[in-house]
Image: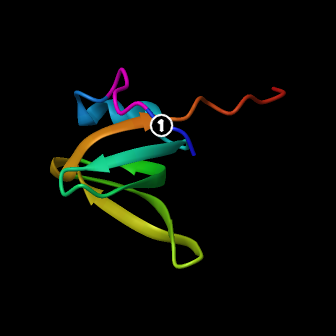
Amino acid sequence: MGYMQQTSPYAQSPWGLQQCIFRFTYMWLRNGDNFWFFLTTVGHQRVYGYRFFGGRWNHYSIALRDIDSFHCSPPTPTLY
């Protein structure tokens, strides 16, 4: 897998994560962890969705204060 740039238009504001709902989003956390995350909900203090580990997608949540930066995948085109 090639290098992925860590900056995105939304990287400076965690509330920009609302633009990433129902998209695959690459997350970089303040503790150095980074991973793909499928975002489903943005709350006041946490984001919720699914993270792939242990060979399957698991429910997962992240505190907004723990997110260093993120990058959303493009929206999935539909036929509608």
Going by the picture, which residue comes out furthest to the bottom?
54
Going by the picture, which residue comes out furthest to the front?
2
Going by the picture, which residue comes out furthest to the left?
65
Residue 52 counted in the magenta span: no
Figure quadrant of residue 68: top left
Q: Which residue is mark 1?
A: 3
Q: Position of residue 14 (x, y in %)?
A: 25, 36
Going by the picture, which residue comes out furthest to the top?
9
**For the point 48% across and 41% down, which residue is it?**
21
**For the point 24% across and 55% down, which residue is it?**
32
Q: Position of residue 49 (x, y in %)?
A: 45, 58
Q: Position of residue 71 (x, y in %)?
A: 42, 35
Kind of residue sitting beneath label 1:
Tyr
Identify the main secondary structure in magenta: loop
**For the point 29% across and 30% down, which residue is it?**
11
Figure quadrant of residue 7: top left
**For the point 44% across and 30% down, which residue is it?**
19
Q: On the picture, is 41 further left or further right than 58?
A: left
Q: Which residues are magenta?
A: 5-10
Colour scheme used in the picture?
rainbow
Q: On the picture, is 64 further left or further right than 25?
A: left
**Vertical position of residue 51 compared to residue 4: above or below:** below
Q: On the picture, is 62 further left or further right than 50?
A: left
Neighbourhood count class around disc 1 (C-alpha, 10 Å): few under 14, some 14–19, many 20 upward: few
